[in-house]
Amino acid sequence: MKVQTTSYRELIARQGLRVTPQRMAILEAVHKIGNHPTADQITDFVRKAHPNIASGTVYHVLDTLVQHQLIKRVTTDRDVMRYDGIMESHHHLYCLECNDIQDYVDVELNALLQEYFKSKKIEGFEIKEFVLEIKGTFNKCKNR
Ligand SMILES: [Zn+2]
C-alpha cells in the first residue's frame, strides 16, 4: 500500500501525536519496507537518513505508533516482533519454509466469521476483530 510522504505527517497528527522526524521516519519505514518488517529491518532503513538514531528510540517509537493505532504488531512463532502498516482488517499467510508473512484479504471470509459468531456467541467475550494466522507453504518454497 502506497502512502505519500506528506501524509505520514497527517496520519501522525490525526492521532493526536506530536509530529517528530523520528516518528515520521519510522512510520515511513514500516510502509516502505512492507511485508511485515522486524524492528531490526526498520532500524537499518531509518539509519540511512538518521544515522545516529538509537535502537531503543526505534523500539520506543514503534510502541507509540502501535498504541496510537498507526501500525500493528504481528506475532510470530519465533521471538521476533514484526510490524504491519496496513490497518484495514486482514489475515496473514505464514510460510513455514521461508517465514514470509503475506497479507490475505477476503471480505467474504470476514462476513462468514461475523455471521458465525453472531449466532454462536462466546460467553463473556466481545469480539472486535478477526485476524487469522493461516500457516502453510507457498508453491515457490515447496521444492527447496
Ligand atoms: Zn499484514
Image (cartoon, rainbow, N blue to C red):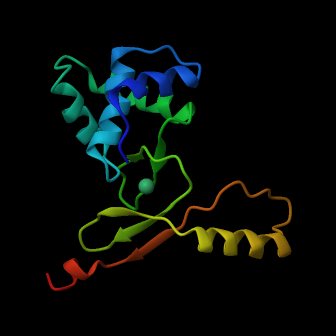
Number of numbered discs overlaid on the protein picture: 0
Above or below: residue 73 compared with residue 121: above
Hey, which quadrant is residue 27 in on the image?
top left
Quadrant of the frame with the C terminus: bottom left
Above or below: residue 95 compared with residue 86: below
Q: Residue 57's spot in the image, x, y percent?
A: 34, 22
Q: Residue 7's spot in the image, x, y percent?
A: 42, 27
31 vs 59, nearest the viewer: 31
69 vs 80, nearest the viewer: 69
Query: Which residue is painted at 53% across and 69% down in the image?
Result: 106
Above or below: residue 138 compared with residue 93: below
Query: Which residue is painted at 60% across and 74% down in the image?
Result: 109
Above or below: residue 112 compared with residue 123: below
Q: Residue 62's spot in the image, x, y percent?
A: 42, 32
> In the figure, is residue 15 to the left or right of 59?
right
Extreme residue toward the bottom, this view? 143
Q: Residue 46's spot in the image, x, y percent?
A: 23, 28
Hey, which quadrant is residue 101 in on the image?
bottom left
Hey, which quadrant is residue 125 in on the image?
bottom right
> In the figure, is residue 51 to the left or right of 134?
left
